[in-house]
Image (cartoon, rainbow, N blue to C red):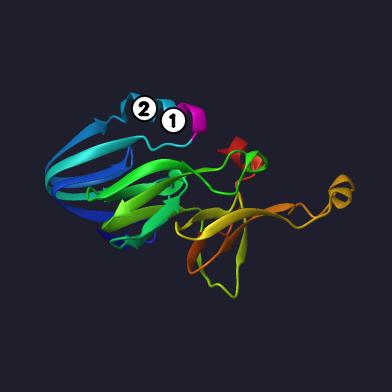
Amino acid sequence: MSVENAKCIRYTVRGEMHARQGAMIAYRGSLQFERKGQGVGGMLKRAVTGEGLPLMAVRGQGEAWFAHEAHNCFIVEVEPGEQFTVNGRNVLCFDASLAYEIRTVKGSGIAGGGLFNSVFSGQGRLALVCDGTPLVIPVSPQAPVYVDTDAVVGWTAHLQTSLHRSQSFGSMLRGGSGEAIQLMLEGEGFVVVRPSELTQQKAQQH
């Protein structure tokens, strides 16, 4: 797996890899593309959480190129014993050696809109897409990071998460700053943030 350019990932397939359905834009060689089912349990969890990955398996020998709506692409290395949690809408493709499951974001509660992410584990590479150039922010025990829940892409999963209210209830009633609640990340690791928020207006435009 390599970054072909800012908007595209190239993957040399020797056996099997997994990608978001519809993300392949070109390929050469002897490759087969098959829709990857999630099983009954996975389908139910996806229906309940709204989180999930419509995946396809790519098998054979050759090269394939992947992209999504001209979004920026970048690669996260998942090491043995580590986990990376990411919003399903940001996943582009990944090594078959990685496993994933849908989990609740700890500490998000109902107030966070029921935050759910896909957690990747194992060893391999995970290609993600982001609306704009992603910002990678280190998190340390001395310096927790607060991120907008609409702008966060993913983070190292061993970080502790909780919702943080930056305004009083009275301030919110008076209109506030528009930045009332953030996701607080504590511990040792990093968080990936995109430079734009997924607002209702943007969703309607797309």
Residue 156 shown left or right of residue 109 in the figure = left
**Farthest-out residue, bottom:** 142
Q: Quadrant of residue 141?
A: bottom right
- Give x and y (percent) for residue 81: 31, 60
- Dot 1: element: helix
Residue 55 visible in the current orientation: yes
Q: Residue at x 51, y 58 (%)?
A: 132
Residue 11 shown left or right of residue 90 in the figure = left
Give the spatial CA distance, label 1 vs label 2.
6 Å
- Give x and y (percent) for residue 59: 15, 41
Give the main secondary structure, helix, strand or loop, of the magenta stretch.
helix
Residue 25, compared with residue 44, is above or below; it is below
Relative to the observer, which residue lies in front, 40 or 194? Answer: 40
Tell me the quadrant of the picture where the N terminus can be found.
bottom left
Residue 95, compared with residue 41, is above or below; it is below
Q: Quadrant of residue 185?
A: bottom right
How packed is label 2: few (under 14 Cα within 10 Å), some, or many (20 or more)?
Answer: few
Q: Which mark is residue 45?
A: 1
- Give x and y (percent) for residue 170: 89, 49
- Dot 2: element: helix
Q: Which mark is residue 41?
A: 2
Give yes or no for residue 21 being in the magenta stretch.
no
Name the residue type under label 1: Lys
Which residues, given as a range, are shown in magenta?
45-50
Instruction: Mark 1 and mark 2 in contact? Answer it, CB < 8 Å.
Output: yes
Relative to the observer, which residue lies in front, 107 or 146? Answer: 107
Give yes or no for residue 48 being in the magenta stretch.
yes
Residue 66 visible in the current orientation: no
Name the residue type under label 2: Gly
Relative to the observer, which residue lies in front, 131 or 118? Answer: 118
Q: Quadrant of residue 58?
A: top left
